[in-house]
Image (cartoon, rainbow, N blue to C red):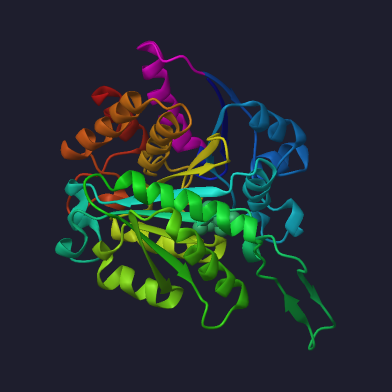
Amino acid sequence: MKIAVLAGDGIGPEIMAEALKVLDALRRDGLKAETESALVGGAAYDAHGHPLPEATLRLAQAADAVLFGSVGSPKYDSLPREHRPEKAILGLRKECDFFANLRPATVFPELADASTLRAEVVAGLDIMIIRELTGDIYFGEPRSVTGEKGQRVGVNTMHYTEAQISRIMHVAFRTARQRAVGRPGKLCSIDKMNVLETMQLWRDIAVEIAPEYPDVALSHMLVDNAAMQLIRNPKQFDVMVAGNMFGDILSDEASMLTGSIGMLPSASLDANGKGLYEPIHGSAPDISGKGIANPLAQILSLGMMLRYTFNLPDWADRVDGAVKKTLAQGWRTGDIAKLGEKVCSTSEMGAAVVGNL
Ligand code: IPM
Ligand code: MG
């Protein structure tokens, strides 16, 4: 297995170091994996003048999977858009056609009272958000800001083809089917069909595909209502499927149900199961360099890689199990600690997970 390691900016390198310690421990136990690292994001811009240098893209394309940290820092906010760090992750998704983003939001029992919502609202929560990643207003043309000051016009375009909607719907239906052992599958499709034509197409295609999955109950929800329902009664959801923009927003919201955005991994898959694995949180410039970031989302992203791209559920279970045990033992970084609880550093958390593997 060849893994491209792209740590990126901010807390990316700090949490990646801990995930690589976990990977090293697994290799000592016989996991066959090679890694090769490259710069990406602001770090790559500083060194090579581009956030996604040719060599980094080629490394990602040649690898079987990509382990990605995070990119971005306010210090690059005034650069032209094509040189900003975010362009690196957007470019990787587009160039490698990683169109299916799986963002699980599960509550570890140990952290049920770390959420800002009452424990009984979130305890036992297990949602899978499937977000389309290569279309929508993120990539739609035209896009621009034109005109003179005082009369400027900003344009972005929500754009989806039938093929793009259809392939993400199939991923979502299949996921709902796989998760539903001994019960009917449940899929809630998110749109804004009351206002947007593109989203009417989204809903129509969901309805057209549904008969192919008679064992999955399909429902629809407008995105504004979904944002509200996620806070009101999140346990009504099983699998949710959304376009790029709505999925971006709802997955951040769902992460807070689990206690901290620092806990959530994600997988971005192409049609053949090759994937890019990254925490859903960003580079957290406010805490970077302090050694206090939570490395668990990065470590769990490694677990997802073993499960989804390499098809090694036993090894993935070991990683997930070690994280669970570490939480049960009381290890807490600042983001998941309750008032008065002892707080550990990034590297102490990583070491505890390695010890529990
Ligand atoms: C995410 C992030 C990215 C996105 C940014 C960094 C471009 O928010 O992965 O959710 O908007 O997709
Ligand atoms: Mg986001």
- Tell which of 312 and 337 is nearer to you: 312
Q: Can residue 194 be seen in this view?
A: yes
Q: Which residue is drawn at 29% across and 26% down?
A: 318
| Residue 268 to residue 246: above or below | above
Q: Does residue 20 belong to the magenta stretch?
A: yes
- Quadrant holding the C terminus: top left
Q: Position of residue 286 (x, y in %)?
A: 47, 54
Residue 24 located left or right of residue 51 = left
Q: Main secondary structure of the magenta part?
A: helix
Q: Position of residue 330 (x, y in %)?
A: 17, 40
| Residue 122 to residue 46: above or below | below
| Residue 59 to residue 286: above or below | above
Q: Where is residue 213 in the image (x, y as percent from the top left)?
A: 40, 53
Q: Give the range drawn in magenta.
A: 13-33
Residue 237 located left or right of residue 158 = left
Q: Quadrant of residue 298?
A: top left
| Residue 108 to residue 135: above or below | above
Residue 252 located left or right of residue 36 = left
Q: Can residue 284 be seen in this view?
A: no
Q: Which residue is drawn at 26% across and 73% down?
A: 232
- Tell which of 31 and 347 is nearer to you: 31
